[in-house]
Every structure is written in C-alpha cells, then in structure tokens.
Image (cartoon, grey):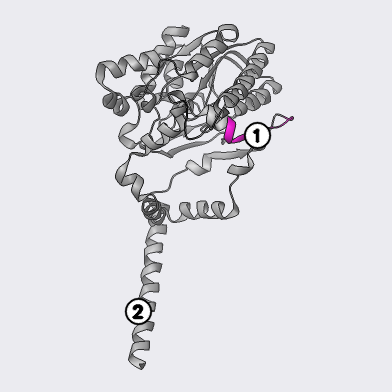
Amino acid sequence: MKNLKTKIKISLFLSAITIFMVLLMDLLIGKFFLKHDETVYRVRDAIFHHTLKKNFSSKKAFWASGFYEINTDMNGFKVSKINQERKDKNFNILIIGDSNAEGVGYKAEKTYYGLLEKKLPKFKIANMAVSSYSPKVYLSKLNYYYNNNFYFEHVILHFDISDLVDDYFMYDYDEKNHITLTKGVTSSKLEIKLNQLTKIFPLSYQVYYKLKHYDEFINIKRNDVYEIIAGEYMYKNKDTYFIKNERDIAFEQTLNFLSKIHSLVKINNGKLSILITPWPSTLKYYDANNILENKLNNFCISKCETFLNLFPDFLNLSDKFGYDNVSNEYFLGKFNDHHFSDKGHAFVADLLYDKIK
C-alpha cells in the first residue's frame, strides 16, 4: 500500500513536471518564433467599435497565408510604406469595406488598393476598410471623418457578401452614430480570458482547437462551411442564417443604411459607387437571379455613380480556368480561406482601373 502511494506521488510529480515543461516550451516558442502582431494593431474604438492602430508598422501581421507587413498612417488607415507620414485630408478616392478591401494577408502595396494607387499616381487614395465592417460601421466611420473635415471626391464602398449578415446580426447603431455589438454576440469575460491565453500558449491552443473541430478538419473544408452558410442567401430561398422573411427585412435595413451613406456622401459633395465581388462558393453555386446583385443594382440605378459588379468577370475566369483553379489562384483557397490572393487583388485592381480611369 505504501509503495502504491509512493508510485502515485511520483507519477503525479512527473506529470506536473511534464505539463510545466510543455507549457514553458509553448510559451517560449510562442514568444520568439510564432509571435505576431495581429491582436496588437487591431484595436477597439469608442465610436465605430474597432479599427487599426494609428502610426503602426510591423512585418508580423498574420493571416492564413502567413506573416505579412502592415503599415498605418495617422488616421489608422492601411497604407503603402511611402504614404505612412502623409497628413492629407482631401482624397480623390476612398475605399471602405471589410477584410477583402483591407487586404488581409498582404501589405498594402500588393492589395487592389495599393495597386490602384500605382496605376493612378495623380490620385490621392485612402483605404478606410477594416476586417468585419459592414454598412452600419461604414456610416459611423464616414460620419466621424466628415465631421473632422475630411473630403472624399469618390467613395467606393466594397459591399462584401457577409455585410448583410453582419449588419443584421452583429451590430447596433445608436442615435450618436456609435456602433456596439448586439447583445447576443458580446464576448463574455471567460471568452476574453481564453483569448488572452491563446496568445500566451499558441501551440496548446492549436491542439485544443483542432480536437474541438476535428470533424470539420477531417470531413469538410473550412471555407466551404463558412461561405455556404454566410453566403447561401444568394442562392437559396431558405438558408441557415435567415428564417421566414428575415432576409428581406435584413436587406431593407441594410439598404436603408446604404441610403444614409449615399445622402452623407452627397451632402459632402462626393459621389458613391458600390463594388461587389464574389467568394469562391458563390461562383460554384452561382444563381443569375440572386438577391444581392438584383437589390444592389436597383439601389445603384438612382444613387450610385457606378455599380462596380465584378461577378461577371470572376465567372468568366471560373468558366475559362475551372472553379478549383480560380479558388486556389485568385483566392486563398489552398489555405481554406475565401479572401483574395495577390493574384486576385491584381485582377480586381485591373478591373477597377478600367472602369474608373
């Protein structure tokens, strides 16, 4: 009996030492080899919920495709390195949108914004886009900068497929033009603590995450899951997010905010264009009568300078080279991600240049 207790004590001690050594190794690897600044330069904002940190530079921003360089100016706009010190308030073109417009995974020079800037050297172009934005946030942020004496001659609003879902389910817009998360998506204290731990022990978190989502990694690609669910309102009458007539209510709400954006831009002597681009899955399951293109086309007839619909251009690519090739070459499909690759950004930049030059 005494020997058994001794063996148990030794086993517990060795287990504790092993766990300690694993966590120490995880901590050191995370600190010196896997450390990234993704959570450093993405910051909270009291008015439009979140933004990019002002006057920030790092070569350790991180996305699915790996580390990349990020530079921001005094306004927190993502910029090319040569524009980091600019203090302009008057711009010929403003791009506003979410993660695809921000250009996650790539430094500004390789995004469609940066490439368009090179093609139009006489134009001053600003990129106000930030991941997870939607029309409510666009309106809030535009209000803020107009109130601070900024001028944008031409606002290109990159409406992402997820914007409808985010606008309806994620954000609340109050009478002060402030953005807050809806009650259902507010992070709990436990989630915040767990998120902090993922930064300290990145390897342990990856093991935990992959065990938790084992069936997803084994049976289906992440981008197919996310895209089909968040974008299926484009090609299904009944979808996962919207029940009964919720989709129509969501569109009515979003179009109302787009109308407010149009009025705001017009009052400030600018013009508005709306840009839409596909996700890989919306090419795969494309429906020519989809609600997104129809609603935004009708909206733009009376309110937009131009409706920049790039769906036909990407569909032509898909027909020519095949869906899988386009998904992997023009998007980050090989990383199970629906965002543009550098080739996708170059393609969008060429199309925009031809349409607005």
Mark 1 residue element: strand
In the rendered image, the quadrant that contains the N terminus is bottom left
Does residue 86 sit above or below 45 in this rendering?
above
**In the image, is residue 332 above or below residue 298?**
below
In the image, the segment drawn in magenta is 168-176
The answer, for residue 185, to whether it is visible in the render is: yes
Q: Is residue 128 left or right of residue 201?
A: right
Circle 1: is it few (<14), some (14-19), or many (20+) Cα within 10 Å? some
Q: Residue at x 36, y 22 (%)?
A: 283
| Residue 172 tag number | 1
Q: CA distance from mark 1 to mark 2?
A: 53 Å
What type is the residue that disc 1 sits on?
Asp
Pick the front one: 213 or 100: 213
Query: Which residue does the image show at 44% across and 8% down from the upper left?
Result: 355
Q: Is residue 65 left or right of residue 151?
A: left
The mark found on residue 11 in the picture is 2
